[in-house]
Image (cartoon, coloured by chain):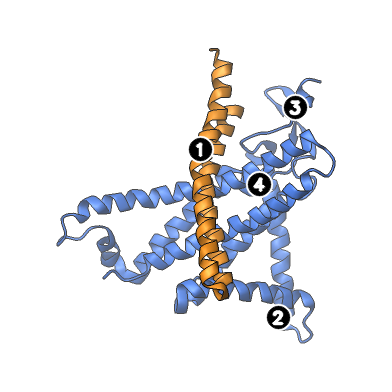
């Protein structure tokens, strides 16, 4: 395998593997938020704010992977 | 010709000109513009608040500031007044920097710059928060200030007691981990903001490159939302860290 090919594989694998865990996390956050909403519909705005904050944290992990992938690609 | 067919993506801000021996980068140039607009807006707000007939601009800004105050009040309670200027300026600064990076012309206006003896085209403007230097500076300010506030509220002894306690030998291990976590906060702050804004920029460039007409519109809407959310996340995290730092240890 040439260096060029190894670089392409590293880029693709970094973001592919790095997106798995955040995807599961965001799914769990969303499902729990909907569950909470079903039990307690009047708390909608509080649930929505907390959910979006939690999703932003989970998403940040995917963003780290993306930054690493971009660094491998462009530097 | 080969060079121009690829989209231009650079992970770091590029120099556009020199001023008194300083390199002025494109992200710094945009942040100066935002800073000027921000200052002018603040002065208009100040003069309208003094005058008798207030314009709709005054009430609009008042509404935004009031909503921010209520948001911080839900975390900080009666300490809000003291921290409000810092937190609100964090929020508004990051929000404006994120949104100005999305304006048409940012990243697409090119100027010729001489580098290593040859002329290359670099973007004249770049979102300030898509530059790791800015986000790292903001992160250091945020984490450093939360330590300063902890010392101010708890006294130096109380501050050290948060990490190490003589009665509790286990705290020498846990305290060290706590100190490391303070540094890791800085890094995660910096990379979260930089990563989100820079990834958004790359996404928009790639979409515009693949399908030049209309396709980038929904992504532009997404980036406006992400810019707002990231400003909110940065500010809320700072708020929570400050409220934890100034809380008395039981």
Of callouts 4 and 3, the N-terminal one: 3
Circle 3 residue: B6
Same subunit, tags 4 and 2:
yes
Subunit of label 3: B
Closest to the camera, between mark 4 and mark 3, is: 3
- Identify the residue at horizontal 55%, vertical 35% (top origin): A15
Find disc 4 in the rendering and name its residue: B28
Q: Which residue was labeled with disc 1?
A: A18
Write the residue at 80% across / 45% down.
B105
Q: Are marks 4 and 3 on the same chain?
A: yes
Residue B170 in percent (x, y) is at: 18, 54
- What separation in Å lies between label 4 and label 3 (alpha carbons)? 25 Å
Q: CA distance from mark 2 to mark 3?
A: 51 Å
A34 horizontally vs B76: left or right: right
Residue neighbourhood size for the residue with mark 1, other residues' Cα within 10 Å, grouped as few (<14), some (14–19), many (≥20): some
The percent coordinates of residue A8 (x first, y second) are: 58, 23
Dot 4 surroundings within 10 Å: few (below 14), some, or many (20 or more)? many
Residue found 69% across the figure and 62% down from its top: B38
């Amino acid at each position: 395998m040439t260096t060029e090919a190894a670089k392409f594989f590293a880029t693709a694998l970094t973001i592919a593997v790095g997106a798995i865990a955040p995807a599961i996390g965001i799914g769990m956050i969303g499902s729990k938020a909907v569950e909470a909403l079903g039990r307690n519909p009047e708390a909608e705005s509080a649930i929505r704010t907390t959910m979006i904050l939690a999703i932003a944290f989970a998403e940040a992990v995917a963003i780290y992977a993306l930054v690493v992938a971009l660094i491998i690609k462009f530097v | 010709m080969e060079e121009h067919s690829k989209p231009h993506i650079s992970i770091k801000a590029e120099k556009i000109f020199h001023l008194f021996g300083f390199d002025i980068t494109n992200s710094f140039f945009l942040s100066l513009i935002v800073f000027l607009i921000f200052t002018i807006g603040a002065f208009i707000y100040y003069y309208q608040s003094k005058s008798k007939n207030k314009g709709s601009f005054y009430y609009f800004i008042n509404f935004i500031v009031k909503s921010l105050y209520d948001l911080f009040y839900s975390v900080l309670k009666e300490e809000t007044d003291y921290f409000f200027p810092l937190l609100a300026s964090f929020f508004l600064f990051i929000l404006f920097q994120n949104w100005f990076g999305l304006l048409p012309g940012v990243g697409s206006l090119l100027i010729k710059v001489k580098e290593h003896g040859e002329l290359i085209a670099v973007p004249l403007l770049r979102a300030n928060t898509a530059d790791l230097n800015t986000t790292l500076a903001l992160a250091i300010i945020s984490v450093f200030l939360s330590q300063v506030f902890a010392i101010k509220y708890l006294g130096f002894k109380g501050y050290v007691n948060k990490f190490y306690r003589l009665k509790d030998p286990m705290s020498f291990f846990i305290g060290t981990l706590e100190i490391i976590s303070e540094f890791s906060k800085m890094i995660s702050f910096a990379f979260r903001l930089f990563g989100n804004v820079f990834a958004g920029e790359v996404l928009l460039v790639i979409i515009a490159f693949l399908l030049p007409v209309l396709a980038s519109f929904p992504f532009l809407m997404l980036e406006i939302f992400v810019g707002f959310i990231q400003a909110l996340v940065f500010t809320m995290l700072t708020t929570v860290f400050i409220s934890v730092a100034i809380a008395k240890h039981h």
